[in-house]
């Protein structure tokens, strides 16, 4: 019986019990992370609904020139009497021609649209498109039995969501006005589009210009269809993320927004300068889109999720602090008291998540950390009945929450912060407990002078 009491009363046994309690706390921390994930999913659903209602993600391809063509096939047929007749059959097809020079200039204004506590960045503005078509090479490739109907040619602009196109102004074709109507004339690059009659003269070349009023959300994608494509995009959004097959050749970033410019030659892409209907498979050009995402680098749900990944750390820290206070204050702390301290620090993440949906993340973090840290300190005071001993809990929790906040705000150095913080915590505990006799109950191993050793 004395042996059992000695084992269960030793600090080594208490340390093992605390380690077991840490494992038990994995259950509520896992539930907290599930709540964070559920709210993040709900936010994504709300954001999708807002963006879809506003106009969808903006994807624009074109313009392209559609030239209707006819092919006449002749078949020689011999009748019963031996007479030969020529049977002619006409087949229609389209010749799609890309511009020889294409310029795109987008100016977009951003705003945040909300549904309840959920919000998403959206934008509206204009895209000015201009350039030149020269169909001479494409027409030269027609066979002798093929005829191009130049007077029936159409200018086609493809767009992913028709709702994202509010209107087209100042459209001209060789100086003459263009009148657009819905439909992509069978282009099939994207799910929607507009077209306008754009007859070609004998020279098979023409200049064009148009300005499209657009709106959408989250991202913009453009397709460099010209043999030479020059594109620029500017907005007041401060956190762009450039995406796609081509990155901008020049860009400027600042708190007031960004501007970026692309220059793409047909030598650096696999897009043909012209093709016949049916020759280009659906999705063949998808990988050539480029553009920008209206990126939120550290949104509240991403920050809450990253914070929840450190939940176990904020169970270990108060446990270790209480254990060290118990060790050196020589006052027993019941396992239930350890659990309550752990639960209090787990609730911090629920407070942080719920508050961040109402106020700025920094303010939510300050409120949640102050409330949880203060509660832990007061509980320690009531446990040890000595404010001088309980006071150690305040700087420990304060530094822990400050360290976590710095880790969350650092995108590139989060792993380094985490590794250094974990190493520092382990080193501190090892140093503080270096003289502990883990076989005794709250006894510190005496030094050589106390034992009367002479060093031999």
Image (cartoon, rainbow, N blue to C red):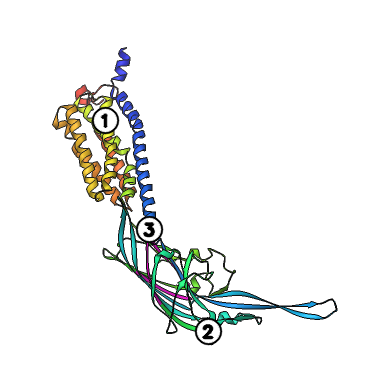
x, y (%) of residue 331?
20, 24
x, y (%) of residue 307?
31, 44
x, y (%) of residue 6?
29, 17
Q: Which of 322 and 158 is in front in this view?
A: 158
Q: Can residue 415 be seen in the rendering of this structure? A: yes
Please say whether residue 225 is one of the residues in the magenta stretch: yes
Q: In which quadrant of the rendered view does residue 231 lie?
A: bottom left
Q: Name the residue under label 2.
A: 204
Write the residue at 33% across / 30% down: 19
What stretch of residues is rendered in magenta?
Answer: 210-233
Between disc 2 and disc 1, the foreground one is 2
x, y (%) of residue 300?
30, 50
Identify the secondary structure beneath mark 1.
helix
Q: Can residue 309 be seen in the rendering of this structure? A: no
Q: In which quarter of the image is the C terminus?
A: top left
Pick out the residue farthest to the right. Answer: 81
Please say whether residue 81 is one of the residues in the magenta stretch: no
Q: Looking at the image, do the residues carrying marks 2 and 1 touch, with CB atoms under 8 Å apart?
A: no
State whether residue 308 is above or below residue 137.
above
Tell me the tag on residue 51.
Answer: 3
How packed mark 1 is, by other alpha carbons closer than 10 Å (few <14, some 14-19, many 20 or more), is few
* Relative to 139, 418 lies left or right: left
Between disc 2 and disc 3, the foreground one is 3
How packed mark 3 is, by other alpha carbons closer than 10 Å (few <14, some 14-19, many 20 or more), is many
Mark pair 3, 1: CA separation: 43 Å
Q: Looking at the image, do the residues carrying marks 3 and 1 touch, with CB atoms under 8 Å apart?
A: no
Q: Looking at the image, do the residues carrying marks 2 and 3 touch, with CB atoms under 8 Å apart?
A: no
Q: Mark 1 points at which residue?
A: 340
Identify the secondary structure beneath mark 2.
loop
């Amino acid at each position: 019986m004395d042996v059992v009491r000695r084992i269960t009363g030793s600090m080594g046994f208490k340390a093992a019990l605390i380690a077991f309690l840490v494992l038990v706390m994995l259950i509520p921390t896992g539930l907290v992370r599930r709540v964070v994930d559920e709210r993040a999913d709900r936010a994504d659903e709300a954001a999708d609904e807002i963006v879809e209602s506003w106009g969808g993600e903006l994807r624009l391809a074109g313009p392209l020139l559609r030239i209707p063509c006819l092919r006449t096939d002749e078949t020689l047929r011999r009748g019963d009497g031996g007479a030969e007749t020529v049977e002619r059959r006409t087949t229609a097809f389209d010749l799609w021609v890309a511009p020889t020079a294409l310029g795109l200039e987008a100016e977009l204004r951003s705003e945040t649209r909300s549904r309840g506590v959920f919000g998403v960045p959206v934008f509206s503005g204009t895209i000015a498109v201009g350039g030149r078509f020269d169909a001479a090479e494409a027409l030269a490739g027609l066979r002798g039995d093929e005829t191009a109907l130049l007077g029936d040619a159409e200018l086609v602009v493809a767009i992913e969501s028709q709702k994202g196109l509010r209107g087209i102004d100042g459209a001209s074709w060789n100086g003459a006005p263009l009148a657009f109507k819905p439909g992509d004339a069978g282009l099939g690059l994207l799910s929607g589009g507009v077209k306008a009659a754009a007859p070609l003269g004998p020279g098979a070349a023409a200049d064009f210009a148009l300005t499209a009023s657009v709106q959408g959300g989250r991202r913009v994608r453009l397709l460099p269809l010209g043999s030479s494509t020059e594109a620029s995009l500017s907005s007041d959004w401060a956190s762009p993320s450039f995406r796609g097959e081509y990155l901008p050749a020049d860009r400027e970033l600042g708190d007031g927004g960004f501007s970026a410019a692309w220059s793409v030659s047909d030598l650096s892409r696999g897009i043909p300068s012209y093709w016949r209907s049916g020759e280009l498979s659906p999705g063949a050009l998808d990988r050539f889109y480029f553009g920008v995402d209206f990126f939120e680098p550290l949104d509240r749900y991403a920050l809450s999720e990253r914070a929840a990944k450190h939940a176990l750390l904020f169970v270990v820290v108060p446990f270790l602090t209480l254990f060290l206070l118990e060790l050196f204050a020589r006052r027993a702390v019941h396992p239930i008291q350890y659990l309550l301290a752990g639960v209090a620090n787990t609730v911090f993440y629920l407070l942080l998540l719920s508050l961040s949906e109402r106020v700025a993340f920094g303010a939510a973090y300050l409120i949640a950390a102050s409330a949880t840290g203060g509660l832990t300190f007061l509980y320690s005071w009531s446990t040890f009945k000595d404010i001088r001993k309980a006071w150690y809990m305040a700087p420990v929790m304060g530094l822990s929450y400050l360290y976590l906040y710095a880790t969350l705000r650092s995108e590139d150095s989060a792993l380094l912060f985490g590794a250094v913080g974990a190493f520092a915590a382990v080193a501190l505990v090892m140093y503080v407990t270096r003289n502990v006799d883990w076989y005794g109950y709250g006894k510190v191993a005496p030094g050589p002078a106390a034992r009367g050793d002479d060093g031999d």
